[in-house]
Image (tube, grey):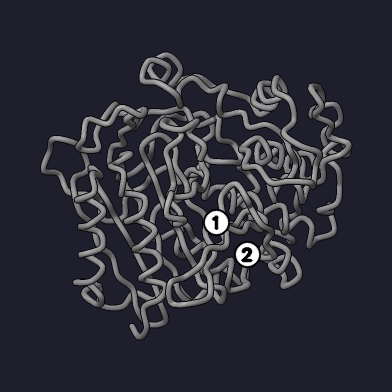
Amino acid sequence: MFAFHRHRRGRLVLTGSAAVLLAVSTGLTAAASEQRADPLQHADPLPRADPLQRADSLQREVDAIHASGAVGAMAEVTSPGAHGTARAGTAASGTGKPMPQDGRFRIGSATKTFTATVVLQLVGEGRMSLEDTVERWLPGVVRGNGNDGSQVTVRQLLQHTSGIPDVLPEIAALHSAAGYRAERFRTYTPEELVGLAMRDSRKFDPGTDWSYSNTNYVLAAMIIREVTGHSWAHELNDRIIRPLGLRGTSTPGPVPFIPGPHARSYASYGNSNGNGTGTDVTVLNPSMGVGSGSVISTTHDLNRFYAALLGGRLLPPAQLDEMTTTVDAPELGVRYGLGLGELPLPCGGSYFGHPGELLGYHTWSGVTRDGTRTAVVYVTSDGGPHTQRAMSTLVEKELCRTGS
């Protein structure tokens, strides 16, 4: 569903979960909620400068993504005093309907940054620790085939160093058109997802290696529920979505439909017909992605979220430092923190972000370390062999751009 993958030239691309294991993508008082919300609710909005600024270069980058095989593409970028958007392609294959200007889409593994943010907020409040074991909060849940929750810490979940196997191979809807048609309305519980993952042996002793696993973030969502007494979705809404005014962002639970304006999404399931289309997979119960990939959002909302996060408006300095302290992720050739990847910039330095994918919708988000420059792009199909490279190139170019 949701992971980074390494291009053969050493650059990063995001492969779809349908094609390659699709590996990619609460109990607080009202006073406490108000204290958290105040600085965010009164924060200045993201700059809304003349939309024609950067139009030519940004449009060329989005056109290149569309030309690579994507049905539709949309990008939005921000920097101090400037804001730009561009779109190309259509909202539905075979039609002339344009991509919606602020359309909603499933953000896949970018959800992990939201989940990690909530966990780190709870750590900052002293309600839990990154060194707590999974067993402390979820006794007996991680057990069998060498999996042992008493040996896995919360930090290792968020960092993907737990060794816990990924549940995605067990989700039929992600692997074939037939599986999608049979299970697109199926609801998975978090407990069921973890149980499916426990069928497999752990990959390594916790803390000794790195391997991307969506099960880690399903468990993180379950721990949020245990710590707060409220669901993962409730906490995301209470702590991030409402305070930041993310009006196009939602946690859909088992609801298979995308609310509001949106383009349709298409999955090729590894059998692209050459123009990026395939099976229409817009309708999907995303409950298999609780904590790991089910959030719906917009380019504007994701830019606002990442700017607030790296700008220090969602986490205290100590917890933001924990999130952005990265370790080698050898299977990917990148570095990974807690719910954030760190990737190199061609102009020097690095940026933080998280790509994501959930059946047809692919997104790439990036933000500079100080939170002043952001770039988000998404497409509505698996596209062609160069689509993901074109998306990451757009993010790199926009974060490296000087001036407005």
Sequence-first tag of 1 and 2? 2
Tell me which amino acid carries mark 1: Arg
Q: Residue furthest front?
A: 9
Q: Tag 1: Cα neighbours inside 10 Å, few (<14), some, or many (≥20)? A: some
Q: Quadrant of the C terminus?
A: bottom left
Q: Which residue is mark 2?
A: 37
Residue 248 visible in the displayed image: no
Q: Residue, x 69% and y 67% (percent of image)?
A: 320
Q: Quadrant of residue 93?
A: top left
Q: Residue, x 76% and y 55% (percent of image)?
A: 122
Tell me which amino acid carries mark 2: Ala
Q: Are marks 1 and 2 in contact (CB under 8 Å)?
A: yes
Q: Quadrant of residue 242?
A: bottom right
Q: Residue, x 35% and y 51% (percent of image)?
A: 378
Camera-nearest residue between 337 and 254? 337
Left or right side of 343 for 90: left
**Picture coordinates of residue 218, whole percent (x, y):** 66, 36
Camera-nearest residue between 40 and 137? 137
Q: Residue furthest bottom?
A: 403
Camera-nearest residue between 259 and 107? 107
Q: Residue, x 54% and y 30% (percent of image)?
A: 287
**Picture coordinates of residue 399, whole percent (x, y):** 42, 72
Left or right side of 290 for 50: left
**Picture coordinates of residue 139, whole percent (x, y):** 86, 30
Secondary structure of the residue carrying tag 2 is helix
**Picture coordinates of residue 3, whole percent (x, y):** 52, 44
Secondary structure of the residue carrying tag 1 is loop
Q: Which residue is mark 1?
A: 242
